[in-house]
Image: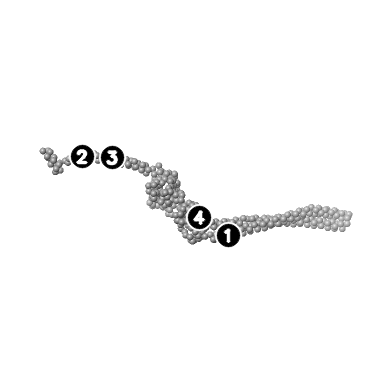
Amino acid sequence: METREREQQAHDGSGPVLHAPEERGTQPRKRWLFLAAGIVVLIVVLVFGIPWLRYFFSHQSTDDAYVDADIVQVTSKIDERINGILVNTNQFVHRGQLLIVLDDRDEIVKLEQARAQYDLALANQRTTVEQGQGGVSTASGEVGQARAQLGVALANIPGAEQGYDKAQNDLRRTESLVATGDVPAAQLDDARAEAAGAESQLNAAERQVAAAQGALSAAQGGVATASGRLAQAADPSQVEAAKAQLDLARRDLRYTHIYAPIDAYVGLKRVEIGQVISSGMELMTLVPAHGIYITANYKETQMGHMRVGQPVDIHVDAYGGVTFHGHILSINPASQNTYALVPSQNATGNFVKVTQRIPVRISIDDPRSDMPLRPGMSVETYVKVK
């Protein structure tokens, strides 16, 4: 009876559902599969998640970074017309390689003129110096003659003085004798005449000495004047000025040939043959073949533990999956905003605080020839700070 009721309940669904022994055995098996899968997922998370977390907390990263280089702008130092351009855009050039040739006809003419002026200045200086030396020699000879005349005049003084003294003594003696009547008065007139003649001779000798001294002074002044003229003639200022003009003309002629200052690639050519250029005008851009680096703009909140020399991982967008390595070369002393034409003043008035970015220069320690890095490429950088 009970058996019949259970069958009736199973048939119409009113009684409990009975499972076969096989169905009851699959439930524990599914639970074990879910548990095993959970364990595998946990292991994967631990294996890959922990290193990722460790890397995340020990590195500071930014995607505001790009490949950079010290690009050189080739300019002209003179105003001239372009005769030839010897390189093409994207071409590699070596340091010292001729890039542009300018028209040099005007510069050659200026050089010839400057050389002629320099030669003329040298010739004038040589002639003037020779004349000055001749003047000094003549004046020196006149000094010698004046000294000889002075010597002769001085030699005549003692004799004239002795004659004057003797005539004066004879005059006084004669006057005494005439007064006593020992000699006639006529002898007094003779003594007086002799005294006057001796005095005249002494005065003449003294005048000769004075004249000789004046001639010597004049001759010495002539030597000084001639020496001054000689010094003026030997003054190198005029020759140096002409030499400076000659050097400028030579320099301008050299400037008609423009050479590459570094090993680089011609990035952009701005001029064509026949174009007239002016001094300082940009002719072409050279992108260095060496010395490429990364400029990464980090937020100021990331700079606390960042130091020069710390290692950096570099991911270049153009080469997905490849990691380049480098290190911090330098940290800019100011934020990007500081160099703006109108920098914001975050410390005054009403303002919206904006996190500033600090440029960081990063080297590339393992460049690859098969993966060239070109300025402007976007990169992501990861600085290890711990």
SS assignment at label 1 = helix
**Seen in the image, is 370 located left or right of residue 240?**
left
SS assignment at label 2 = helix
Q: Which residue is mark 3?
A: 36
Q: Residue 200's image quarter?
A: bottom right
Q: Which residue is mark 2?
A: 22
The numbered dot on residue 98 is 4
Q: Residue at 55% of width from left, 59% of height from top?
A: 108
Q: How far apart in space, not on screen, are marks 2 and 4 (Cα)?
A: 90 Å
In the rendering, at what x and y percent does residue 31 appear? 25, 40
Q: Are marks 4 and 3 in contact (CB under 8 Å)?
A: no
SS assignment at label 4 = strand
Dot 1 surroundings within 10 Å: few (below 14), some, or many (20 or more)?
A: some
| Residue type for callout 3 | Ala
Furthest-front residue in this view: 370
Quadrant of the image containing the C terminus: top left
Q: How far apart in space, not on screen, are marks 4 and 3 (Cα)?
A: 73 Å
Of labels 4 and 3, earlier in sequence is: 3
Q: Are marks 2 and 3 in contact (CB under 8 Å)?
A: no
**Seen in the image, is 28 located left or right of residue 316?**
left
Q: Residue at 43% of width from left, 44% of height from top?
A: 310
Q: Which residue is mark 1?
A: 112
Dot 3 surroundings within 10 Å: few (below 14), some, or many (20 or more)?
A: few
